[in-house]
Image (cartoon, rainbow, N blue to C red):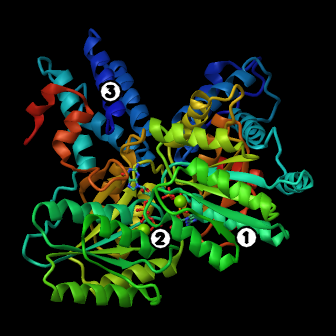
């Protein structure tokens, strides 16, 4: 459909438009948020305007190539976090490394916390789980079951306690007993729920964890963008710290349920700049992977 | 709240078109593009949106419209009808009757809100004088039975489940049998979360359905779901006879367009919305008032019941 305009002087915006529109549609079909798809196409367009088209190339191929590069750049983390290295560094300082799992309701925080615990165990790291979802029915028993199956210590104070305090006591207990890592489970909350976002910001402020891990599901549509930008904004706004802690990394779950609709990964990273540190791809402990940037880029453009 | 922003964008697009001096191809296209954009931002399936655009263009064939016809009104009506068509499968869902035993089975993707919604559904009916009961046929998720038990206890609703038995089909059948004997008129069966990519999970769902013979199967869907909604909902419908949809987590910022996809895919109406984590955060859903609310325009009522 896209005619070759090889030989023409310089690329103009209008030359690029139809190829970019087709690409934008493709991204949206793959579940990239509308706003992100539009922004990406605009920046690709801007990067190509005025460029000369080499002979024997088509506009659609040059657009696709530029988009692939842009996607690759976005998905490749700027800041890299090496949890295993940082765990050992914390150990040398005589304190446990603390990860807090945050996110909206039902995305897979508790299940993937258990998967991360299992992964750490495989690296001979001792773990304690902290049951700081003191709200949702069955949340404590859920974590208790995982702790029992994995033979991991669980710190819990039942329901209706202040989760910030439970986390603090868990960290103290882990320090006393020489645990390497504390994994803090929190209750799911909607990004717009102010009291709950305040409570989360308090938990993070009081305990200053090593890693604030945002758990988001690959199934999410346009709301994924809103979730990440609001968690970051609210954590900043409601914190009493002068330099508030925001989202450090992303754990993308339910990757096994979306076929080729992998767009949420892109939306989440684009909007937050945080790296995808783990990908959950099933309901078993071993179903935790690293993000394959190449595969995502290929799938998005196919 | 619900889909409200989407409604706002659509009414603005219509308003802009109304402001145009002449309604030609260009004005119509601009209006439709705006609406398309709003629907895509709300997570309606891409193909449904494109089909809707084509349908409206077909209905509103500008050249065929004789002079004197009110073009604006015809366009507005076409948009309203198309939106209703997406949300309204044409036939109402099975409605349980008080005093007569009905079995309702809840299914859906992992974490969509089934267990929470089962209790809400039971509580809603209990307040209206029904005798509901809850059966936990989720033997997979850690803490699933505790979750249902704690919810049921809070709402003072009888429940059935087991910590030892690992076969959900067996538990479901036993639970339903027990509550039939106890003369409960609304027996609600909660099941594990599952997805179409795992055939064994779908087979388990089929077996639970076969063993309990539900009068209604409700597909529970997270209101923030994106483009995967249609395929997943359709796959559920292929295995069991889904008859209604409940959309959860509508207290968030999501515009809930996935609901439109699920309705289209299951040919079943949305009957309730979940609007919070608490038992009473549950709203009855009705298509037509919803669409007119969605479009944020008072005069839409004139289009109804046509
Ligand atoms: N298919 C699939 N299911 C998953 C994955 N991760 C989690 N789940 C399932 O998603 C459901 C919800 O998981 P939870 O861990 O309870 O989610 P949560 O975020 O802790 O939920 P709340 O604490 O209630 O907000 C469970 O049925 C999990 O088994 C995944 O990677 N793939
Ligand atoms: N804010 C909000 N949260 C909800 C709503 N409905 C359910 N939730 C929350 O969503 C999370 C998941 O709900 P569950 O009822 O455990 O979901 P499920 O479908 O039974 O999950 P699985 O059994 O693991 O597949 C919990 O944290 C619920 O409290 C709602 O309408 N609004
Ligand atoms: Mg949890
Ligand atoms: Mg459940």
Q: Nearer the viewer, residue B12 or B108?
A: B108
Q: Residue at x 89, y 54 (%)?
A: A85
Dot in front, 1 or 2: 1
Image check: B105 left or right of A33? left
Residues at circles 3 and 1 in contact by the CB criterion of under 8 Å = no
Image check: A244 left or right of B233? right
Residue A60 x/y as whole percent = 68, 36
Location of residue A175 with respect to B46 vertically, above or below: below
Q: Chain of mark 2?
A: B
Residue at label 2? B194
Q: Chain of mark 3?
A: B
Residue at label 1? A118
Tag 2, which secondary structure?
loop
Label 2 beta carbon less than 8 Å to ligand 2: yes
Label 1 beta carbon less than 8 Å to ligand 1: no
Any part of residue A222 in sight: no
Image check: A83 left or right of B300? right
């Amino acid at each position: 459909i896209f005619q070759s305009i090889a030989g023409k002087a310089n690329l103009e915006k209008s030359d690029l438009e139809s190829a970019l529109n087709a690409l934008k549609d493709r991204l949206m079909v793959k579940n990239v948020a509308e706003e992100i798809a539009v922004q990406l196409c605009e920046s690709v367009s801007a990067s190509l305007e005025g460029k000369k088209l080499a002979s024997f190339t088509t506009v659609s191929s040059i657009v696709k190539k530029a988009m692939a590069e842009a996607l690759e750049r976005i998905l490749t983390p700027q800041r890299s976090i090496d949890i295993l290295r940082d765990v050992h560094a914390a150990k040398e300082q005589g304190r446990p490394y603390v990860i807090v799992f945050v996110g909206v309701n039902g995305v897979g925080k508790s299940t993937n916390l258990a998967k991360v615990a299992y992964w750490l165990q495989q690296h001979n790291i001792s773990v304690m789980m902290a049951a700081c979802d003191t709200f949702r029915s069955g949340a404590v028993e859920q974590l208790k079951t995982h702790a029992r199956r994995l033979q991991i210590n669980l710190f819990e104070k039942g329901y209706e306690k202040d989760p910030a305090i439970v986390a603090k006591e868990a960290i103290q207990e882990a320090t006393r007993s020489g645990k390497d890592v504390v994994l803090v489970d929190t209750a799911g909350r909607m990004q717009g729920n102010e009291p709950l976002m305040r409570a989360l910001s308090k938990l993070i402020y009081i305990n200053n964890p090593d890693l604030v891990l945002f758990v988001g599901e690959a199934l999410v549509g346009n709301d994924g963008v809103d979730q990440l930008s609001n968690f970051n904004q609210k954590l900043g706004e409601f914190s009493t710290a002068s330099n508030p802690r925001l989202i450090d990394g992303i754990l993308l779950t339910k990757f096994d349920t979306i076929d080729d609709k992998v767009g949420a990964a892109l939306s989440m990273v684009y909007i937050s700049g945080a790296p995808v540190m783990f990908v959950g791809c099933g309901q078993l402990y071993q179903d935790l992977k690293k993000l394959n940037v190449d595969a995502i880029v290929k799938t998005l453009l196919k | 709240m619900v889909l409200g922003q989407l409604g706002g964008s659509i009414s603005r697009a219509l308003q802009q078109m109304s402001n145009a001096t002449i309604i030609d191809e260009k004005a119509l296209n601009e209006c439709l593009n705006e609406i398309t954009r709003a629907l895509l931002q709300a997570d309606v399936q891409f193909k449904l949106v494109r089909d809707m655009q084509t349908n409206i263009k077909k209905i509103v064939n500008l050249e065929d419209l004789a002079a004197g016809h009110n073009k604006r009104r015809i366009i507005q009506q076409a948009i309203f009808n198309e939106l209703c068509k997406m949300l309204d499968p044409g036939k109402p869902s099975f409605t349980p009757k008080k005093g007569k035993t009905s079995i309702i089975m809840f299914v859906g993707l992992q974490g969509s809100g089934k267990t929470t919604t089962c209790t809400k559904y039971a509580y809603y009916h209990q307040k209206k004088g029904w005798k509901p009961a809850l059966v936990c046929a989720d033997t997979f998720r850690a803490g699933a039975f505790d979750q249902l038990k704690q919810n049921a206890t809070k709402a003072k609703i009888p429940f059935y489940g087991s910590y030892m038995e690992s076969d959900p089909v067996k538990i479901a059948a036993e639970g339903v049998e027990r509550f039939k004997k106890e003369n409960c008129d609304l027996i609600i069966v909660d099941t594990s979360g599952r997805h179409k990519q795992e055939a064994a999970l779908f087979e388990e769902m089929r077996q639970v359905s076969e063993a309990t013979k539900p009068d209604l199967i409700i597909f529970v869907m997270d209101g923030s779901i994106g483009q995967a909604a249609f395929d997943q909902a359709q796959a559920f419908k292929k295995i069991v006879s889904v008859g209604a949809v409940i959309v959860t987590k509508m207290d968030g910022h999501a515009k809930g367009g996935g609901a439109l996809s699920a309705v289209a895919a299951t040919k079943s109406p949305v009957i309730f919305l979940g609007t919070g984590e608490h038992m009473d955060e549950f709203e009855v859903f009705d298509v037509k008032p919803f669409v007119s609310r969605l479009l944020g325009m008072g005069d839409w009522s004139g289009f109804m019941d046509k």
